[in-house]
Image (cartoon, grey):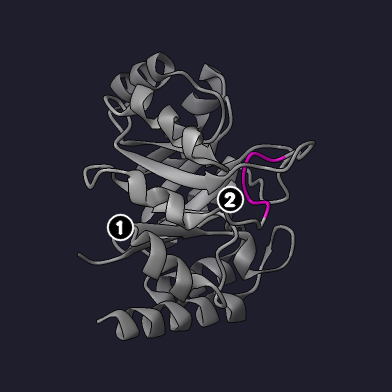
Amino acid sequence: MELEIKICGLKTEQAVTAALSGGASHIGFIFFPKSPRNVDVETAARLGRLASGRAKAVAVTVNADDQTLERIVDIVQPDVLQFHGSESPERLDDIKKRYGLPVMKAISVREAQDLLALSAYREVADRFLLDAKPPVGAQLPGGNGIPFDWSLLASLDGEVDYMLSGGLNAANIAEALAIARPRGIDISSGVERAPGEKDPDLIRAFFTAVQAARGERE
């Protein structure tokens, strides 16, 4: 199965171009004012058009209200809606039916029992994003640049479709793929020169590392 790769938190044409050139299957736009990766809907719509027919555009929100979601869907026209807050299964089911779009639910992981949260969403989420639980006092639910113990994922059954996230970078992606064997990976801070500033060179280096790691596995 082809590994899917999502570069998240994109804000510039240069970063999107680097992601697409590397072979990204998904590009993510974050709509959360507290994040240094926050982007306005008009910019996301423009950047998303660059990926049309090449990669899926993912709109990432955190406990967004109906008005915010309506504006994102109407203007950005994303392919996937990703939820990184405390949204309930009922809330996601309502949104999914309203817009007819696939939904991805982020689950924060630090220890094995955190994975129990998946069960409540399995009937509604089309995919999960398994991310490291943020440190105490952190302002962001994701994008904190920290990994979790990937060996915890060995307990998941093979039917759980997820993207692995949290602290991934060119230096550790080979280990992450070998241990977790995910169907997809998501990276944001691991390809930045500073919070919210994607570095095209780091994006290219990440894809090179992924290719090398997959070659070793094969």
For image coordinates 37% across by 22% down, the residue present is: 120
For image coordinates 43% across by 46% down, the residue present is: 58
For image coordinates 34% across by 58% down, the residue present is: 182
Answer yes or no: is residue 47 visible.
no
For image coordinates 57% across by 43% down, the residue present is: 110
Q: Where is residue 108 in the image (x, y as percent from the top left)?
A: 54, 39
In which quadrant of the rendered image does the N terminus lie?
Answer: bottom left
Main SS of the magenta segment? Answer: loop
Counting residues from the N terminus, which is met first, the one under dot 2 or under dot 1?
Answer: 2
Query: Picture quarter containing residue 129?
Result: top left
Classify 174 as above or below 141: below
Image: magenta residue range: 140-144
Q: Residue furthest right?
A: 137
- The residue under label 2 is 43
The secondary structure type at the circle numbered 2 is: helix
- Counting labels gives 2
Q: How far apart are marks 2 and 1 (CA)?
A: 29 Å
Query: Picture quarter containing residue 99?
Result: top left
Q: Position of residue 192 (x, y in %)?
A: 67, 67
- The residue under label 1 is 183
15 relative to 96 in the view: left or right: right
Task: Decide which of 94, 185 is in the foreground and name it.
Answer: 185
